[in-house]
Amino acid sequence: MKIQGKVFVVTGGASGLGAATATYLVGQGAKVIMVDMNQELGLEMQQRLGEHSVFVKLDVTDEHAVKVFFDNVEKEYGQLNGLVNCAGIAPSAKVLGRDGMHDFAMFQKVLNINVSGTFNMIRFAANLIAKYKLKAGEEERGVIVNTASVAAFDGQIGQSAYAASKGAVVAMTLPLARELAREAIRVMTIAPGIMETPMLKGMPQNVQDALGQMVPFPPRLAKPEEFAHLVGHIFENAYLNGEVIRLDGAIRMQPK
């Protein structure tokens, strides 16, 4: 699928992987709707990217709000060609910690945002993408790209909730791709390793360097732009479907 002239929704678009993805897509000539809960950063992104982007504050777990959002996308743009799910949270807590057991409400919150929120966006996006009228020479209506994590495979101590949530995103990839094939919609997932996110960039440089040295090659933190370029390749390579790609420099996380 050609990116230029197409319409995409990017969740978590105000910062990190989502912001890098939105920036890349706009640079390739796409129209991008960024959604996030951080309105201040979201509006800054909208101003930075210009007329081909717009920011909407949205809770991806709110069924009614998400329905209204996609209704508005359809009215404004008349089509949707892709969704990139980057919204998520990653708190760390042990099942049996110094302060007691893992908070159950936090476990539920992680799964609600990372799994239910992702699925909520997928179902409404797929419903709108499926309405796209294929033009001559086109073989697909759209693409959905989800964000998992290497924690889905190598979860560390304290990551029970996060690893479970990202494992669920991995697990839904193939059945979604199989089901949506009849609508000419592809579904892919990226499992990033240690990314140079705003949170990590706020750490001391020696800590960043130590984390980077854990990666076999290249021995550094992954850049959000590398994630964004992979999203772009997935959109443009029509034979990528139903698969999870580890973007991790061959790292396998240790227990802690």
Image (cartoon, rainbow, N blue to C red):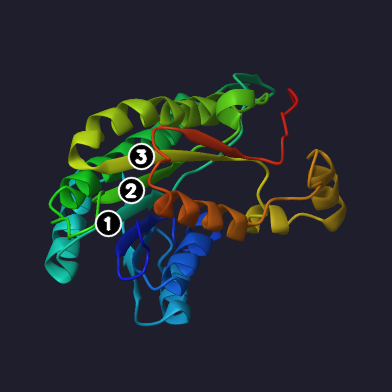
Q: Position of residue 58 (x, y in %)?
A: 31, 57
74 left or right of 43? left
Q: Quadrant of residue 203?
A: bottom right
**Please, what is the three-letter code of the amino acid marked with disc 3?**
Val
- Quarter the C terminus occupies: top right
The relative height of residue 58 versus residue 256 in the rendered view (above or below) is below
Q: Residue at x 30, y 71 (%)?
A: 5
* Residue 65 horizontal side relative to residue 96, left or right: left
Instruction: Give the Cα distance between marks 3 and 2.
Output: 6 Å
Pointer 3 local density, CA inside 10 Å: few below 14, some 14–19, many at least 20 = many
| Vertical comparison of 174 with 15: above or below | above
Nearer the N terminus, badge 1 or badge 2? Answer: 1
What is the quadrant of residue 99 in the picture? top right
Q: Earlier in the sequence, mark 3 or mark 2?
A: 2
Separation of marks 1 and 2 at Cα, in angstroms: 7 Å
Q: Which residue is mark 3?
A: 187
Q: Quadrant of the N terminus?
A: bottom left
Q: Residues within 10 Å of mark 1 (few under 14, many from 20)?
A: many
Q: On the image, numbered disc 2 is attached to which residue? A: 143
Please name whichever residue, 96 or 140, is drawn nearer the observer in this view of the structure: 140
Circle 2: is it few (<14), some (14-19), or many (20+) Cα within 10 Å? many
Where is mark 1, residue-wise?
81
In this orientation, which residue lies closer to the viewer: 159 or 194? Answer: 194
Residue 20 in the image: above or below residue 172? below
Rendered residue at 49%/34% (across/down): 244
**What amino acid type should be assigned to the residue bearing mark 2?**
Val
Instruction: Tell me which amino acid carries mark 1.
Output: Asn
